[in-house]
Image: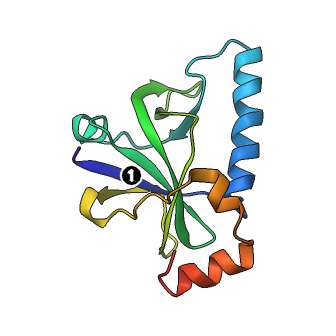
Amino acid sequence: MGLHLVKLCVGAESIEDLVDWQKGRLAERKRLKLKPPLSHVTRMVPKRQEELLDGGSLYWVIKGFISVRQQLKAIEPFKDTDGIRRCHLVLDPKLVPTGVQPRRPFQGWRYLKVEDAPKDLKGGLRSYKEIPPKLRLELGELGLL
């Protein structure tokens, strides 16, 4: 495993928001029989696909902090209806909460080295939900979560 991606999760206030949004999107895509079932569309196609697909994940930045990740399953370039090249980042539906790591706003996505990625939280989403949101933010700012 050699590389991950980091992306802003625009519009989400929490991991729960991302979970709800993705559940709705997944249900709609299944209803319409669209492939891939769960993906995030970006304009740029990562050039380091082989490294990313060797166990890499997409780390989501929510409210200024990396908070959760999803494993990358595939990277599928395509052209949209206007002929513009885009890319499906095909994601595992399982969201894995991580220790929080501050990030300033940026456009697009960024590569993230394995050694720089925050560790997964033990207990997954269940243990994450047990900590009140305000406390999670404070613990994250202190580097304790």
- What is the residue that sits farthest to the bottom in this orientation? 142
Within the image, what quadrant is residue 36 found in? Answer: top right
Residue hosting label 1: 5
Q: Is residue 64 left or right of residue 89?
A: right
Name the residue nearer the viewer: 116 or 44: 116
54 or 74: which is nearer to us? 54
Q: Quadrant of the N terminus?
A: top left
For image coordinates 25% across by 63% down, the residue present is 115
Does residue 101 show up?
yes
Is residue 10 among what the camera can see?
A: no
Residue at the spot x=58%, y=82% of the render? 139
| Label 1 SS | strand
Where is residue 58? Give x, y as percent: 45, 48
Query: Which amino acid lies under the numbered mark 1 shown in the image of this protein?
Result: Leu
x%, y% of residue 117? 35, 62
Q: Is residue 31 left or right of residue 88?
A: right
Q: Horizontally, is 10 left or right of 58 in the view?
A: right
Q: Residue furthest top?
A: 33
